[in-house]
Amino acid sequence: MAIAYAPGKVILFGEHAVVYGRPAIAAPVAQVRAQATVQDAPPGSGLTLVAADLGETHVLGAPPSDAMRALEVTARNTLARLGLASPPDLRITIRSDIPIGRGMGSGAAVATALVRALAMHLGAPLPPDEVSRIVYETEIIHHGTPSGVDNTVIAHEQPVYFVRGQGMERFRVGRAFRLAIADTGIYSPTRVAVGDVRAAWQADPARYDALFDAIGTVVVAARRAIEAGDVVALGPLMQRNQALLREMGVSAPELERLIAAAQDAGAPGAKLVGAGRGGNMIALLEPGGEAEVIAALQAAGAARVLVTTVA
């Protein structure tokens, strides 16, 4: 039996603009994770995928449901990468406590755990770059036009500076900082928001390219601040990034309510994460002020609040 895990993630700066070649910064969130367990199965039974949280089971080769299609593609691509022409007799069980449609990379994390566990069980563990490449193919199913951020940061499990087409750069966090991650409770599929932004960009490319450029400038400044340990500079940069995302049309009243609550409680900055239109937001926490911000987020209707350290 082999068991593998993968964390969630948050984009700290740069969502949406990253799809159009501007940089983004993302970090893993170890407080939530996906798990895949691989066990040998009886001869002739084939490869069975069990999505425990969904209550669905699928045998490779049978027509998959919409919910199981990404898992089938991930398993097939992993087997192909390992040079196996036919599926072995295995039973793979997948579980995850990463909320779906909340900008935390749930689909990429599930795929990463699956790739890792399957390769490990077959005696050929893959390096993070290879895992990321396989998972990117799964991300196409989930998002249509994925940026590559989710598979990269989750497969490598460390903060990254990412530019589409140029890959990722690991960089030093000069001083650890803490974030509250608050869930609006609203499901927001990435594919829909990304598609809407693409349509808006096609209708008015000059305006949206200017927005993307402005976000890219924020991301570059944020990387400098993070590397220098200048946590104080991050709050205003988060506020600027959120203002640009708001202008882009991907915020939502529920997000704005949580952002305002966090800032009123003393958070130096807060913004949506991921596709927006719901999902999660993040708030920068100051030492000694965490409890107040968390309480304010809960009072403002957050369905769940996590705290993570970026280091």
Image (tube, rainbow, N blue to C red):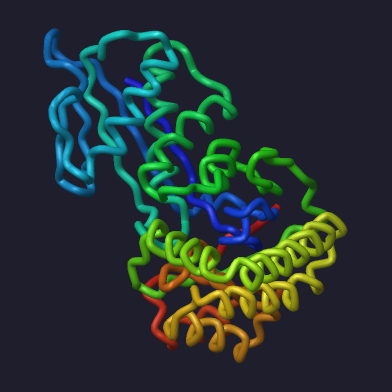
Left or right, 201 with respect to 185, comes to right
Q: Quadrant of the N terminus?
A: top left
Tally the marks: 0
For the point 52% across and 20% down, which residue is it? 126
Question: Of 65 and 6, which appears nearest the observer?
Answer: 65
The image position of residue 184, as x and y in percent, is 40, 75
State which quadrant residue 76 falls in: top left
Farthest residue to the bottom: give it: 264
Left or right, 168 with respect to 230, comes to left
The image position of residue 84, as x and y in percent, is 35, 9
Q: Is residue 55 above or below residue 177?
A: above
The image position of residue 285, as x and y in percent, is 66, 73
Question: Of 87 and 282, which appears nearest the observer?
Answer: 87
Farthest residue to the right: give it: 228
For the point 68% across and 78% down, which residue is it? 239
For the point 66% across and 86% down, which residue is it? 266
Left or right, 200 with respect to 100, comes to right
For the point 78% across and 65% down, which residue is it? 217
Q: Is residue 95 above or below residue 283?
A: above
The image position of residue 209, as x and y in percent, is 66, 65
Question: Of 11 and 200, which appears nearest the observer?
Answer: 200
Left or right, 306 with respect to 65, comes to right
Q: Is residue 121 above or below residue 110?
A: above
Question: Of 114 and 142, which appears nearest the observer?
Answer: 142
State which quadrant residue 121 falls in: top left
